Image (cartoon, helix red, strand yellow):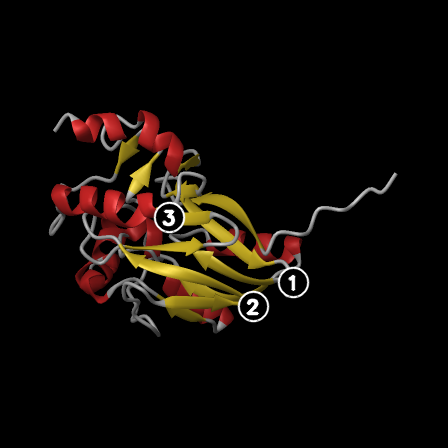
Amino acid sequence: MDHQTAPEPPIKALVVPVTPLSQNCTIVWCTKTKRAAIIDPGGDIQRLVGVLEQKGLTLEKIWITHGHLDHAGGASALKALTGVIIEGPHPDDQFWIDDIDQSGARWGMKEARSFVPDRWLMDGDRVRLGETEFEVYHCPGHTPGHVIFFHREARFAQVGDVLFAGSVGRTDFPKGSYSDLIASITGKLWPLGDDVTFVPGHERLSTFGAERRANPFVSDEALAAI
């Protein structure tokens, strides 16, 4: 009997909650090259570097979905330690990044520092990691410069604080917009496909299809009733 081995996926991902806010920092890597990106290193940098070493990964990129402290507060320290470049978010989040030092002091995260990304990201950009490529979508609403990262072949997305399992991102922050958030979810995320598994900025993973069926804020039924 011929037993065929399933092909190795193009990428793998590991979620490592960081900071007192339990933010879902995500380590993604190209399985062929073991080149990795850390998405949203909000803090706990030594722990993240330890995970890279345990997995035998080489850090190549730092990717930021948006400028909030718990997602971006450790980017500067991680870059200083490793020398890798920071890509993202969209430039409309510059004011949030500029506030990281002060917000870090307020939250007792004194190691958090502001930074200037090596590359701002725009809607439709692509970012490379090893031999793989991720698509970038600008998804404002939670913050004006929020982006998400999508790997089409793997049917995988890291969406930051745009969408959660059973909920959506807050919009009561400066320059937040509920209407923009809903437009981002329905216009940018849903077209990617119901089968896409996503990592939110906090708590458990889900799929776009599950949220379209049951999320009380953005399910097809909820939106039809508006």
Q: Is residue 167 above or below residue 109?
A: above
- Disc 3 marks a residue whose amino acid type is Leu
> Which quadrant, please, contains the N terminus?
top right
Tell me if label 3 and label 2 are in contact, CB under 8 Å: no
What residue is shown with label 1? 32
Q: Is residue 194 left or right of residue 162?
A: right
Horizontal and vertical percent position of residue 64: 35, 59
Residue 37 image position (x, y, % from top left):
49, 61
226 left or right of 35 in image: left
Give the secondary structure at mark 2.
loop
**C-alpha separation, residue under disc 3 versus residue under disc 1:** 25 Å
Q: Residue at x 26, y 36 (%)?
A: 168
From mark 3 to mark 2, how far is it between C-alphas? Answer: 23 Å
The residue shown at (44%, 61%) is: 134
Q: Which mark is residue 192?
A: 3
Mark 3 and mark 2 lie on one chain; the one further toward the N terminus is 2
Is label 1 in a helix, a strand or a loop?
loop
At label 2, which amino acid type do we have? Answer: Gly
Q: Position of residue 6 (x, y in %)?
A: 71, 46
Q: Nearer the viewer, mark 3 or mark 1?
A: 3
Q: Which badge, 3 or 1, comes first in the chain's sequence?
A: 1
Q: In the rendered view, does 108 fall on the left or right side of 93?
A: right
Crowding at label 2, few (<14), some or many (≥20) Cα neighbours within 10 Å? some
Looking at the rendered image, the quarter that the C terminus falls into is top left
